[in-house]
Image (cartoon, helix red, strand yellow):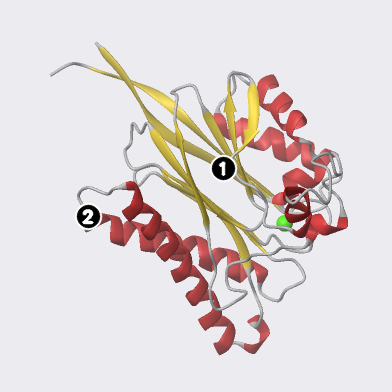
């Protein structure tokens, strides 16, 4: 009996306790190996439209264009991911031009792509302050760096890494999808272990919880199904005030038993 695994995503989204609408969006496609979270920009008209458009455009683009290629090198994949983000950017700007009430809308996006169902590599692509984390060996580490003025200042040494996450510059995005005529996505690759989990989230989670609190909740719910872990994170963010919409998407390896041929 050969035991193998496949990667499966679980996701939840919640309006929170303060906002009038949920401007987050998410997409899960275990077959394609693509999981996406987007956060429509608060304060901009049509944030909920922008996040939905981005998720749909990226999913459609990758599904369509991956099919034409039998073997993709990492470089081809990087081009594919950037092209998918460009497609989302153009789609959002086009809609914004046609409907005055949606003018100026934009969104963050973070997504994970795994080329094979029992993948050993994962690619992480993002624009904005929606995050990806790796949970490995009871530790949590960030796979993305926010595109915010706060993170920029930290990176050049003008502010300490320990600066509070609710610092005013933490809310000022330096990149967004749909905001300008072009947008550059950050792309990175990690080697996967079967016991890894990847967490994608909108900043609603990070406004209420520090990284070590996120890890503690995942650990407390270790034996529960992925869906319940995602909900436990949202429940805690809401218990602490739920100041923003919160989306959590957890990707885990599921064991499958199969008979040898
Ligand atoms: Ca948000």
Q: Quadrant of residue 44?
A: bottom right
Q: Earlier in the sequence, mark 2 or mark 1?
A: 1
The CA distance from mark 2 to mark 1 is 29 Å
In the depicted structure, whether residue 157 falls above or below residue 47: above
- Say whether marks 2 and 1 touch (CB < 8 Å): no
- Residue at 64% across, 81% down: 102
Residue 224 pos. (x, y %): 59, 23
- Near mark 1 (Cα within 10 A), the count class, few <14, some 14-19 or many ≥20, is many
Quadrant assignment for the C terminus: top left
Q: Nearer the viewer, residue 67 or 149?
A: 149
Q: Nearer the viewer, residue 150 or 122?
A: 150
Residue labelled 1 has its Cβ within 8 Å of some atom of ligand 1: no
Residue 168 pos. (x, y %): 87, 57
In the depicted structure, whether residue 121 falls above or below residue 103: above
Residue 11's tag is 1
Q: Residue furthest top?
A: 1
Residue that numbered label 2 is attached to: 69
Ligand 1 rendered quadrant: bottom right
- Residue at 33% across, 36% down: 117
Residue labelled 2 has its Cβ within 8 Å of some atom of ligand 1: no
Q: Quadrant of residue 137?
A: top right
In the depicted structure, whether residue 91 falls above or below residue 159: below
């Amino acid at each position: 009996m050969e035991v193998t695994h496949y990667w499966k995503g679980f996701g939840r989204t919640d309006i929170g306790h303060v906002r009038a609408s949920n401007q987050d969006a998410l997409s899960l496609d275990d077959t394609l190996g693509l999981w996406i979270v987007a956060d429509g920009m608060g304060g901009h008209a049509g944030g909920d439209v922008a996040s939905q458009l981005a998720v749909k455009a990226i999913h459609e683009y990758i599904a369509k264009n991956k099919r034409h290629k039998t073997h993709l090198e990492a470089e081809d994949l990087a081009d594919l991911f950037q092209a998918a983000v460009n497609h989302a950017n153009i789609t959002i700007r086009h809609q914004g031009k046609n409907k005055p009430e949606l003018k100026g809308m934009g969104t963050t996006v973070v997504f994970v792509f795994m080329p094979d169902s029992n993948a050993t590599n994962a690619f992480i692509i993002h624009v904005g302050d929606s995050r990806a984390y790796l949970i490995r060996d009871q530790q949590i580490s960030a796979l993305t760096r926010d595109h915010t003025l706060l993170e920029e200042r930290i990176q050049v040494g003008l502010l300490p890494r320990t600066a509070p996450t609710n610092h005013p510059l933490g809310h000022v995005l330096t990149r967004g999808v749909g905001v300008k005529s072009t947008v550059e996505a950050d792309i990175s690759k990690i080697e996967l272990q079967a016991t890894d989990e990847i967490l994608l989230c909108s900043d609603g989670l990070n406004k209420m919880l520090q990284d070590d609190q996120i890890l503690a909740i995942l650990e407390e719910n270790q034996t529960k199904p992925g869906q319940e872990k995602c909900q436990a994170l949202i429940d805690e963010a809401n218990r602490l005030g739920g100041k923003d919409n919160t989306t959590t998407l957890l990707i885990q390896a599921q064991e499958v038993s199969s008979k040898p041929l």
